[in-house]
Each structure stands twice: as C-alpha cells, then as structure tokens.
Amino acid sequence: MAGEHDTVDEAPASFGDLVVLVRGRMPRLSPSHRLLAELVMADPERVAFMSAAEVAAASRVEESTVHRFVAELGLDSYKALTDLCRAGLREGGHLLRRFAHLQQLGVDDLDEDPLAQALVSDQANIARTLGRIDPDTWDRAVETLAAAPRVFLFGIGKCYVVGYHFGLLLRLVRDEVFSLVPGPGSLIDDLRRIRPGDCFVGIGIHRYGAETVRSFRWAQRAGATTLALTDNEASPLVRGADMVFFVETAGVSLLRSITGFVSLSQALATSTAAALGAEARPVLQRKEELITQFGIYDEIDDLPPPTPDALDDPPGPEATPGNGA
C-alpha cells in the first residue's frame, strides 16, 4: 500500500523532529499507519510507556503494522520511538515537576473527592499547557493580536465558550474583535469580511468541528494570520497554521476540561493589553462610559436599605410577576 514502504533517509533525532516528519507524511500514510501517527502525536505521554502490542491494540491494528510504521519513520526499533516520546516529555516537563507534589497530597482520597480530583487534574492541565509554549511563538501571537486590523475567533461546542471568553477579554483592550457564531447564515457573512492581515483564531479539540476547520481554511486562503488553539499535533488546525498553542484538556471522568484554554486566553489577552499600552486606554474608557450610561450592572450601593416591614412581610402571591397581578 502507498506510504507503507516509503522510508526516510535519516531518522528523527528528537520528538520535535518526529512530529515534523509525521505531520509532513500524514497525507501519504496508509489508513493503518495514519491511526498510529495520530496516536503518537495526540498522546505521546501514553505511547512513551506502552509496548508495541499495547499501541497496536489501542490503534486497532496488528503488532506487525506498528513495527512497519516505526521502520518507515527511519527508526531501527520500537524502543527508539518510545525513547523519542520520553525525551519529548522531559523537554516539556520542567513546570510539571512543580505540581508533582499535588498528586501525592491526599492521594488516598482522590477516588472519593471530586474536588481534589479536579484540583490535581486542572493544575496539571495548566502546567502542561503553559510549559509547552515556545517564547518566540508567544511573542508573535501577542504582536499579531495587538496589531492586526481585526481579530476573528471561532470554535464550536465547548470551544465556542472559549472563543467567546477570549473575545470578551480582547474587546476590553482593543476594537474590531469578533467572536463568530456557528450557523450557515451569520458565519458566512462574518467570514466574508476577513481580509489579508487580519488575525483568525481557530479553537478546536477532538472531535474537530467541520465548521471550525472549514472556517480556518477560508481564513488561510483569505490571507489572514492564523492562530490555532488545539489539543494535539494530529489536529487538522495545525496544518498550515502560522502559530499553534497546544492545550491539555484531560478531565477527571468523561468530561474534558477547558481550564487550560481559559488560562491561556487570559494570559494572551493580558499580554496583548501590555503590548498595546496607552492605546488600550481609550477602549476601556469608552466601555466604562457605555456601562454607566446604560446601567448595565446592578449597583447595590445605590439601593435604599430594606425597611423592617419589608423583611418581615415578603410579597404575597398577588405581587408575583406573571400571575396576572
């Protein structure tokens, strides 16, 4: 089959090299090899400590297919693959060591205490997310978010919430920020407005929304600078993206966590505000003026104190809204 005997001349020397190699060969891989490639890129921590037989079972392929896949990558043994995965973990693990002690605190109670489980899981998610960030990529992302004429953000499902939150933070410090809404009508109208030099932030986790991927591709063709916030190297948002940040989403049960996304977007928005400097002040002032003029928030201090009669004698049924009173 195509892709199963097309070996490389030089074996990858690091996990980063491995990722670049696999990503570049992905379109030419056979279906079974593509399953293995996706597992390696999506879950290197797991692969690092699995046997070839376990990887085969997880990918639903034969063990012999695993060894052929390893050979295709230019590696001389399956152990060479796991060594690269483990080396990748060591390279990105400096922040994780700060949180290792959390996993030892109250470990006997974790199975019975969902709050302790959430604490340990989300602390690790944040550490892994921030620990994988390349400083040069970070600087480029902040510069783009601050300088682009317009910023568009899009994701669906849980990722829609992330995009809305990220957009809300950016709109506090700059104008022309749009959190796009899924749907055939408004989404198409919004995508039409993307121009060269704009920034498009695509947000997606497995399983990746078709609308998100198609919108990301449209933004690329329109000449926008693209930033992907996603969960692993196998994500379709990675291909062709100008910048990528990988976010850990492990949850304590079936539910995946978006804590890493929230922390990352908060940090990006904060750095964008710092990059804008004095330019952010007029945006904040206009927002505060509008909030005051429209009375957006309930000002508790402006309310008169309740009278003793009001406390002792709550409204009866006749005063309840909606009952015809």
Image (cartoon, rainbow, N blue to C red):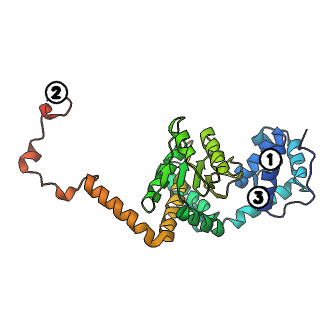
Going by the numbered disc 2, the residue's amino acid type is: Gly
Q: On the image, numbered disc 2 is attached to which residue?
A: 324
Decide: few, some or many residues near mark 3? Use Cα within 10 Å; few <14, some 14-19, many ≥20: many
Going by the numbered disc 1, the residue's amino acid type is: Met
Q: On the image, numbered disc 1 is attached to which residue?
A: 26
Confirm or deny contact between disc 1 and disc 3 (CB under 8 A): no
Decide: few, some or many residues near mark 2? Use Cα within 10 Å; few <14, some 14-19, many ≥20: few
**Mark 1 or 3, nearer chain start:** 1
Of tags 2 and 3, the one toward the viewer is: 2
Q: Is residue 183 left or right of residue 306?
A: right
Q: What is the distance, in whole Å, between disc 2 and disc 3 at their CAs?
A: 68 Å
Q: What is the distance, in whole Å, between disc 2 and disc 1 at their CAs?
A: 65 Å
Expressed as whole percent of the image width and height from the top left, the position of residue 108 reads 54, 54
Decide: few, some or many residues near mark 1? Use Cα within 10 Å; few <14, some 14-19, many ≥20: some
The residue closer to the viewer here, 163 or 294, is 294
Numbered circle sitting on residue 181: none
Q: Residue at x 56, y 46 (%)?
A: 256
